[in-house]
Image (spheres, grey):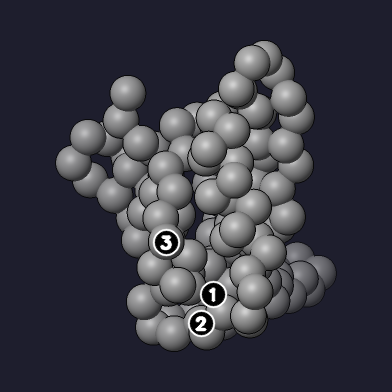
């Protein structure tokens, strides 16, 4: 199975998530000014960013890797390359998205050596 999301932590450690991702495009501060009997005027500051959510099944070893990424011994350095996700749209094409907020994952044990993990990645500016 092809990895749909590859997460690269600030220390360059990577983890693949085989799951079903959801992308939400957020348009903060976009407004429509409405006036009686007139067409609304749109103010679009073009500050769009993406939020990617994913539920995936991880092995215990993958969960240990994720645990280390979420609880590093020292604070990570966010630079122009990491942390990021590579979200594959198909076998060849992908989006690279720098992450600002990685919602703490929720892991649920589903069977021997298998954990269902929910995680959310919020894009930051480049």
Residue corresponding to mark 3: 13
Name the spot of residue 41 as percent of width and height, x first: 63, 74
The disc placed on residue 109 is none
Q: Earlier in the sequence, mark 3 or mark 1?
A: 3
Question: Residue beneath label 2, please?
Answer: 78
Q: Which residue is mark 1?
A: 124
Where in the figure is residue 42, as x and y percent of width and height? 61, 73
Residue sitting at 48 percent across and 65 percent down?
A: 9
The reply to whether discs 1 and 2 touch (Cβ–Cβ < 8 Å) is yes
Above or below for 13 versus 46: above
| Image-based side of 75 in relation to 14, left or right | right
Picture quadrant of residue 44: bottom right
Asked which secondary structure carries label 2, the reply is loop
Residue 4, position as x, y percentages in the image = 39, 38
Left or right placement of residue 3 versus residue 34 in this view: left
- Identify the image quadrant of the N terminus: top left
81 or 77, nearer to the observer? 77
List the single residue furthest toward the left: 92
- SS assignment at label 1: loop
Report the residue at 27% width, 35% height from top.
90
> Could you say where residue 30 lies in the image, as x and y percent from the top left?
65, 72
Task: In the rendered view, tell whether residue 15 sits above or below residue 55.
Answer: below
């Amino acid at each position: 199975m092809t990895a749909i999301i590859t997460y690269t932590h600030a220390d360059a450690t990577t983890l693949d998530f085989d799951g079903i991702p959801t992308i939400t495009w957020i348009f903060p501060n976009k407004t429509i000014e409405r006036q009686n009997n007139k067409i609304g005027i749109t103010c679009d500051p073009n500050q769009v960013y993406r939020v990617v959510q994913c539920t995936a099944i991880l092995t215990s070893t993958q969960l240990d890797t994720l645990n280390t990424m979420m609880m590093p011994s020292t604070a990570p350095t966010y630079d122009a390359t990491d942390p990021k996700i590579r979200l594959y749209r198909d076998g060849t094409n992908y989006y690279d998205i720098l992450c600002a907020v990685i919602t703490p994952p929720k892991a649920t044990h589903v069977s021997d050596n298998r954990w269902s993990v929910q995680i959310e990645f919020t894009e930051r500016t480049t």
